[in-house]
Amino acid sequence: MHRRFVPLLLLLLSAALPAAAEQPAASPFFPYPMKVDRLPNGLTVVRVPFNSPGLIAYQTVVRVGSRNEVEPGKTGFAHFFEHMMFKGTKNFPEGEREKVISTYGYDDNAFTSDDVTVYHSYGPTAGLEKLVQIEADRFRNLEYSEPSFQTEALAVLGEYHKNAAQPYLKIEEELGRTAFTQHTYGHTTLGYYEDVKAMPQAYQYSRAFFERWYTPDNVLLVIVGDFNDDALMQAVRTHYGPWDRKGTALPVPAEPRQTKERSVHIDWPQSTQPRHLFAWHTPAARLDTSDAAIQTVLTDYLVGPTSPLYKQLVLDKQLAQEIGSDFSPHRDPHLFSLVAVLQEEGHRAAVASAFNAAVRELATGKVDAARVEAIKSNTRYGLLMGMETAKSVATQLSWYSGIYGTPDALARHYQKVSEVKPSDLISFAKKYLTAANRTVLTLTPAGGKK
């Protein structure tokens, strides 16, 4: 499953967390109790008791994504390897794990992003001990034959073709290759097409990939729901304790500073709506700065449903079907974007002018402080409303802990969001939302005029 959600060099978690159990401080942004242990092998185990009688969410966060694909010709491998993780072991050959999962009725899947890969199961507490056993087994002892590997490579190629039938993948590819000249964010999670086609010949590399990234010191377990903590931790220590591989951090090339505006145009061969996109290079998500929090607020401030731009372009003048931003926190410096799906090609200049005017107004110091406060309040409300099930809590925890490298990242990120001031938006816009730092992408469908 391919997702681009949305850095820093790989942080080995064994250096970040104490070995003894800890209880992170209570937070208004994460109102549930949390326990964290780190096993001697470096595996971080996060547990959140949650009122979901008879149900648990069990997620495994591997801190590897397309950003880590630094070797030429090997893009798309983090996503491809997500597929291979369902291929079985000697103890549970291919198909046997799925039989166990279906017997208990677990909802079971995975996704890969630029920065992390997450495996998630949701279902009855009655199967938890067995789930711990089979999950530990595949992360320790994954096995697959070369023919099985090659078959799955063809399935991944088919997934690429399916995604390529829609304009979103092409937009992501062209934006990445234009905005990034050195960093691995220049390719998508699916990888370059030529690399995807060559995957069947990379069996030996796939084994090295597993040994390099699927290590306990690069993984967090996140378990949320109805469980006995002592019994759970006993099972975790029994089945994960012998896992003894060590991670190897590979340097990710830094992206040079952009000094001149870039642009790229896509002529889309089928019928679709025209697109217009602005993207600026912005800093990485880190908990010792407010950069990611500022961008979280800035997204709604500029193009959210209460923004003047939304009212002008979507509601009043109906120049765009929708506007928004693709921003999400990333482990390394990434992009902040403004995106418009136009009603028709003839509206492009007016939409671009409106985007420019809104950014210029903010950068010159005009900001609606009341709207900033309302956005922060709504963001907190939306976060809490989005954590009403064990699965949703686990997913939020997994995502933020995977990006930032610490179990309490969700609460700390949203604490930063609550501290954003109107002046922060002004300073950020002045520093980063400049023409020289911008990449402009345009898409015109068949029959449209450039």
Image (cartoon, rainbow, N blue to C red):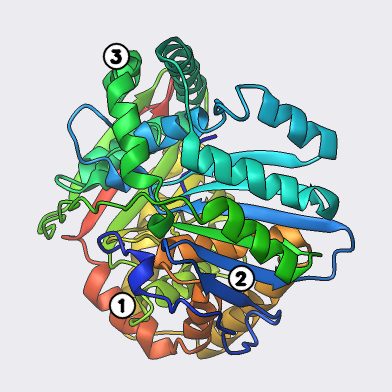
Locate the C terminus by quadrant.
Answer: top left
Depicted 347 relative to depicted 268: above or below: below
Q: Looking at the picture, how far across and down is residue 135, in whole percent?
A: 60, 44
Please report contact status of discs 1 and 3: CB closer than 8 Å, yes or no: no
Q: Looking at the rendered structure, which numbered label has been put on residue 213? A: none
Q: Secondary structure at mark 1?
A: helix
Q: Tell me the amino acid under the disc marked 2.
A: Thr
Please determine whether, in this image, residue 22 is positioned above or below residue 175.
below
What is the number of callouts on the image? 3
Q: Please identify, in this view, whether the residue under mark 1 or under mark 2 is nearer the observer.
A: 1
Q: Is residue 279 visible in this depiction of the protein?
A: yes
- Measured Cα–Cα span from mark 2 to mark 3: 51 Å
Tell me the CA gap for discs 1 and 2: 20 Å
Where is residue 177? Give x, y as percent.
23, 38
Q: Nearer the viewer, residue 236 or 335?
A: 236
Instruction: Identify the residue under disc 1.
Output: 428
How crowded pointer 2 is (Cα within 10 Å; few <14, some 14-19, many 20+) is rated as some
Please rate how many residues cluster around mark 1, counting C-alpha atoms within 10 Å: few if below 14, some from 14 to 19, many from 20: some
According to the image, label 3 marks what residue?
201
Measure how far apart labels 1 and 3 are at the Cα level: 46 Å
Q: Closer to the observer: label 1 or label 3?
A: 3
Amino acid marked by disc 1:
Phe
Which element is circle 2 on? Answer: loop
Residue at 15%, 56% (x, y): give it.
254
Judged by depth in the image, the label closer to the viewer, 2 or 3, is 3
In the shown orientation, is residue 98 left or right of residue 295? right
Q: Residue at x 54, y 53 (%)?
A: 240
Residue 108 location in percent, x, y?
69, 40
Is residue 340 rendered to the left or right of residue 131?
left
> Nearer the N terminus, badge 1 or badge 3?
3
Residue type at numbered disc 3: Gln
Mark 2 sits on what residue?
A: 306
